Amino acid sequence: MSKRGKRLNSIDRAATENFSKLLLDYVASEDPDKLRVELRGAQDELLWSKTFNLESDAPLAGAPAQEFKGLGEIEITEMVHAKLQEIRRHEELEELRALRDQLEDENEALHKQLGELEEVVAAKKNIEYYSNIIGLALPGLAKMLNKTALGGTLGMLAGMDTEVQTESPDKDQRDTIIDLANEFMRELDDAQLGQLYLVFIELSNNPALISQLLSHLSSK
């Protein structure tokens, strides 16, 4: 409060419910001509201020308390409400950002897991695919090789009736595939056979590479 430019007493802090009565008592006792109201934050930063001109002939003592109370409290309440809303929006924004980061991490982990599962499924499909090819090819191979030692065995594996006598009628499918691999290797030249030998060395050291190699070849 001030009068003719001279600063008078002031209210630094007061409870909300006591503010209006305390302010009226000060105005009545000090008889100021101006009243300055400041709203400050926790760090004493100025958030809002306003100066009111008071008429010296106003009946301060008999004025209703509610009339003056509405003048300052409404504006102060609006400022405090706006500040609280700003703080809440900031907190909600931080929570949303944290939730977004968490969902992105979970999404990345799920994509990685999905990729691994797709590789496993693709490998299984490739194995089934080549197994079907082998099954479908056996009848044709049996006809082509019916005059060789493998012809009869291939015919039996393919479910064909044949009277061709073979040197190894008791061979099972595993032995037949091994014999076919041997026949294939005999037809390779030295350079190709040497390269295939190096491949066999890698596969023998790590048999798990067989399915990966099959998947790679099928993708080509």
Image (cartoon, helix red, strand yellow):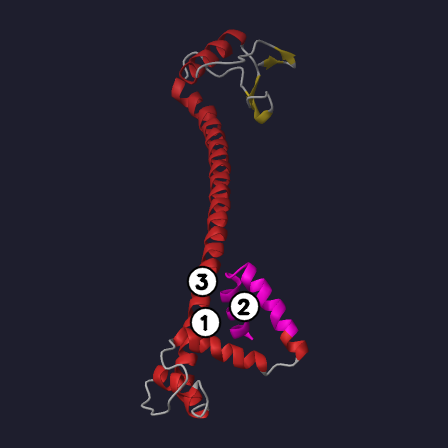
Mark 1 crowd level (few <14, some 14–19, many ≥20, 10 Å Cα): many
Towards the viewer: 14 or 53? 14
Measured Cα–Cα span from mark 3 to mark 2: 13 Å
Q: Secondary structure at mark 3?
A: helix
x 47%, y 75%: residue? 178
From the viewer's perspective, is residue 146 above or below residue 65? Answer: below
Measured Cα–Cα span from mark 1 to mark 3: 10 Å
Read off the residue under disc 1.
Answer: 126
- The part of the image, by quadrant, that contains residue 189 is bottom right
Read off the residue under disc 3.
Answer: 120
x 33%, y 88%: residue? 160
Q: Are marks 1 and 3 in contact (CB under 8 Å)?
A: no
Q: Give the percent coordinates (x, y) of residue 122.
A: 45, 67
Which quarter shows the C terminus?
bottom right
Q: Secondary structure at mark 2?
A: helix
Q: Give the percent coordinates (x, y) of residue 47.
A: 57, 27
The residue most toward the right is 191
Towards the viewer: 26 or 80? 80
Query: Is 59 inside the magenta-drawn segment?
Result: no
Which span of residues is magenta-colored?
Answer: 194-220
- The part of the image, by quadrant, that contains residue 159 is bottom left
Mark 3 crowd level (few <14, some 14–19, many ≥20, 10 Å Cα): some
Read off the residue under disc 2.
Answer: 213
Measured Cα–Cα span from mark 2 to mark 1: 10 Å
Q: Earlier in the sequence, mark 1 or mark 3?
A: 3
x 40%, y 78%: residue? 132
